[in-house]
Image (tube, rainbow, N blue to C red):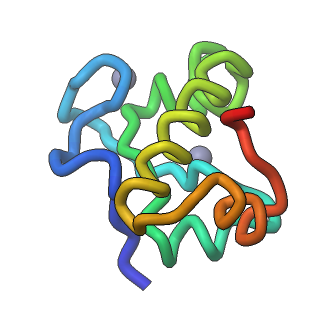
Amino acid sequence: MERFSILQDKKECYVCKTTKDIHIHETYFGRNRQNSIKDGCCIYLCSRHHNMSNEGVHFNHDLDLKIKKEMEKTWCKYYNKTIDDFRKRYYCNYLD
Ligand SMILES: [Zn+2]
Ligand SMILES: [Zn+2]
């Protein structure tokens, strides 16, 4: 399945806006990876902000959390759902 992003319409790094060396990251990974892909909870990141440095979302907990929160808000708006719906689908929630 082609991955897409409900958060971004341009393929540029969410953090630094570069369009070079772009990866696509599943915001909710592990057991939530498939739902992330289906729902478009994916985000474009350059290699540095993805997993090629300690600043990357896979190693930087603050950035990971920031993106998870932002994505949850966007998911609720995009699909016209509540935080409870999010919790049912993703077994967790980052907004309260
Ligand atoms: Zn970047
Ligand atoms: Zn990733």
On screen, 88 above or below 28?
below
Which residue: 41% across, 48% down?
A: 74
Q: Is residue 42 left or right of residue 65?
A: left
Image coordinates of residue 68 in percent, x first then y, are 60, 38
Image coordinates of residue 80 in percent, x first then y, are 41, 65
Q: Ligand 1 appears in which quadrant?
A: top left
Q: Quadrant of residue 12?
A: top left
Image coordinates of residue 70 in percent, x first then y, are 49, 35
On screen, 10 above or below 64?
below
Which residue: 52% across, 71% down?
A: 37
Q: Quadrant of residue 3?
A: bottom left
Image coordinates of residue 57 in percent, x first then y, are 60, 29
Residue at the far bottom: name it: 1
Toward the viewer: 18 or 67?
67
Q: Is residue 56 left or right of residue 59?
A: left
On screen, 35 above or below 71?
below
Which residue: 35% across, 61% down?
A: 78
Toward the viewer: 72 or 47?
72
Q: Quadrant of the N terminus?
A: bottom left
On screen, 58 above or below 11?
above
Q: Quadrant of the C terminus?
A: top right
